[in-house]
């Protein structure tokens, strides 16, 4: 097949595969297209097999295309092929869509036809249009306008847009239009809604660059294309001492700001829809919204919507990963004595998510929590966290559990650094209380009781229902010799959560090293605890 001229939507059996949008859909008995969640690696393999339908595609060719420049074992390919078969072979009687030719490669058997995706849009003949916006967030980064009046500065404005596209593309939580498509709008005034239709995206990032002498101003704004609403905007003024350093700094700032803005907008979209009309992605977003509120009732609602997402699409890996977090949180919110069982259920869900998508960073993060907290295996937790970060360098949760694993294994300074990265990536994260716990513990274990006290007190103000910081307030005051304040703080720590205090103080939990546990007890005894 001629990949250069073929339309991007391939249809085979009951499936629609949109290579440009990075989405796979299944046609239901009612004729509606229902999104199917498949990992990015599996989709890349499917794209290659579909393009060469009927032909033998060698294992080496697939490995080079899907893992370019990377040495990986063939077992990785086998895992991805198995994931595709679980999706594509449902309902088939004893045969698979993908034929394995032992020792040689694979052949895609179904007949493939192409949908002509070109219609007559307003303002131009033959311009492509794509009304199938992917279920997950999709974004086009337009070339930034050069307002400097100097064509020699085009490299800088183009470079910023290029770098933002590259950085956003590293996140698996959203679909990013390639540069070659988004840059076709360079120096053109085109309505955002038309861009959304033509590229099949929900969000558009546009911006401008103006240079004056040794100063540069970059303005960026994120638009929800469906409504035309601006959901985020920022201005960056910098001295242009080192052009590439400034470019990197602005790129990092923009990409870190965009992801939470899109996540918030996606959750708001899901909230506006009636529960019975949610698809799997939207049910997952609704669950994230409840999870972010953090109370017991909302955690229960999050559990409900995650189960709904899994029911709608059993092969959607991310809700399983999120369900693992919900089990962990529910275990912490309930009786502490139930936590081991909750962590065991979390591990089951995390492993199910990884089985569905080995490259799902949230599943690796959940598995890291289960390893570190239920078994005290901080080495395993750190390994899972590092792998999650290698897949998604902007995953704040991965840095949180990395910081916890480092801190509670004695590497407190490194742990605090990871915690600070998490805070920079997601300053309003639902896991904010845990981020503070990481920071206060790292300070306390280093015997910097003044800093530990400051962080712990800020946590009790901002997360009044979270019991752990109260113990660190009391222990830090005890170590500082402020006996009267320490005694009052101890009473408060017991009053806020008596069961939690009893569970976590009277017996060492698996994630505590013996010396760190005794260090906490020493501070509490100095505060007046007589246990």
Image (cartoon, rainbow, N blue to C red):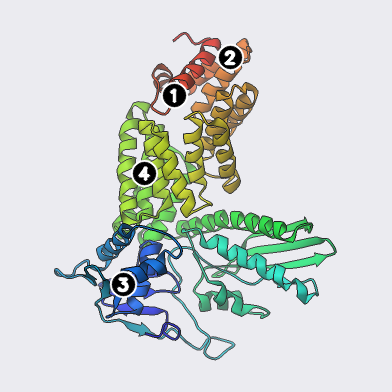
> Quarter holding the N terminus?
bottom left
Q: Which residue is mark 3?
A: 58
Tell which of 431 and 304 is nearer to you: 431
Look at the numbered discs 1 and 2 and tell me whether their residues touch, using CB distance below 8 Å.
no
Q: Position of residue 266 (x, y in %)?
A: 50, 59
Residue 85 figure quarter? bottom left
Q: Percent from the top left, x then y, of residue 229?
A: 61, 65
Q: Residue at x 43, y 19 (%)?
A: 505
Residues at marks 2 and 4, CA–CA distance in whole angstroms = 36 Å
Residue position marked by numbered label 1 in the rendering = 513
Q: Of callouts 4 and 3, which one flags the residue occurring earlier in the amino acid sequence?
A: 3
Q: CA distance from mark 1 to mark 2?
A: 21 Å
**Residue under label 2:** 478
Nearer-the-camera pick, 374 or 103: 103
Q: Which sits earlier in the primary sequence, circle 3 or circle 2?
A: 3
Assess disc 1: are there few (<14), some (14-19) or many (≥20) residues with their C-alpha within 10 Å of its C-alpha. Answer: some
- How far apart are the two marked residues, 1 and 4, measured between alpha carbons? 25 Å
The disc at residue 324 is 4
């Amino acid at each position: 097949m001629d990949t250069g001229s073929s339309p991007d939507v391939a249809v085979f059996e009951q499936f629609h595969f949109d290579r440009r949008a990075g989405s796979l859909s299944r046609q239901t008995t009612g004729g509606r297209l229902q999104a199917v969640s498949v990992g990015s690696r599996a989709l890349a393999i499917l794209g290659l097999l579909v393009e060469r339908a009927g032909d033998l595609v060698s294992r080496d060719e697939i490995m080079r295309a899907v893992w370019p420049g990377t040495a990986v074992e063939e077992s990785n390919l086998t895992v991805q092929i198995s994931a595709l078969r679980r999706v594509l072979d449902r309902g088939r009687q004893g045969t698979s869509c993908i034929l394995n030719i032992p020792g040689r490669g694979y052949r895609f058997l179904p007949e493939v036809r192409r949908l002509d995706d070109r219609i007559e849009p307003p303002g131009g003949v033959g311009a492509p249009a794509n009304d199938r916006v992917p279920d997950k967030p999709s974004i086009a980064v337009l070339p930034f306008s050069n307002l400097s009046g100097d064509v020699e500065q085009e490299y800088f404005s183009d470079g910023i847009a290029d770098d933002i596209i590259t950085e956003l593309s590293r996140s698996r939580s959203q679909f990013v239009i390639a540069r070659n498509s988004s840059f076709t709008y360079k120096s053109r005034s085109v309505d955002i809604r038309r861009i959304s239709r033509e590229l099949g995206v929900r969000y558009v990032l546009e911006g401008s660059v103006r240079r004056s002498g040794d100063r540069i101003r970059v303005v960026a704004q994120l638009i929800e294309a469906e409504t035309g609403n601006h959901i985020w905007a920022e201005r960056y003024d910098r001295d242009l001492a080192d052009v590439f350093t400034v470019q990197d700094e602005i790129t990092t700032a923009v990409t870190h700001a965009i992801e939470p803005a899109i996540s918030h907008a996606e959750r708001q979209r899901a909230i506006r829809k009636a529960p019975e009309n949610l698809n799997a992605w939207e049910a997952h977003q609704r669950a994230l919204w409840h999870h972010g509120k953090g109370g017991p009732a909302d955690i229960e609602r999050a559990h409900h919507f995650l189960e709904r997402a899994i029911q709608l699409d059993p092969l959607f890996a991310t809700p399983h990963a999120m369900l693992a977090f919900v089990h962990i949180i529910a275990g912490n919110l309930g009786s502490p004595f139930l936590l081991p069982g909750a962590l065991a259920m979390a591990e089951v869900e995390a492993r199910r998510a990884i089985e569905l998508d080995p490259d799902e960073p949230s599943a690796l993060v959940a598995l890291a929590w289960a390893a570190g907290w239920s078994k005290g295996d901080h080495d395993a937790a750190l390994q899972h966290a590092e792998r999650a970060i290698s897949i998604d360098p902007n995953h704040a949760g991965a840095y949180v559990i990395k910081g916890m694993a480092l801190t509670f294994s004695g590497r407190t300074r490194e742990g605090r650094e990871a915690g600070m990265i998490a805070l920079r990536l997601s300053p309003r994260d639902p896991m904010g209380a845990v981020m503070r716990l990481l920071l206060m513990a790292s300070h306390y274990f280093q015997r910097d009781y003044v800093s530990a006290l400051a962080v712990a007190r800020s946590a009790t103000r901002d997360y009044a229902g979270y019991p752990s910081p109260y113990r660190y307030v009391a222990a830090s005051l005890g170590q500082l010799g402020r006996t009267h304040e320490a005694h009052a703080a101890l009473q408060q720590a017991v009053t806020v959560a008596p069961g939690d205090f009893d569970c976590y103080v009277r017996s060492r939990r698996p994630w505590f090293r013996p010396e760190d546990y005794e260090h906490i007890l020493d501070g509490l005894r100095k505060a007046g605890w007589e246990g």
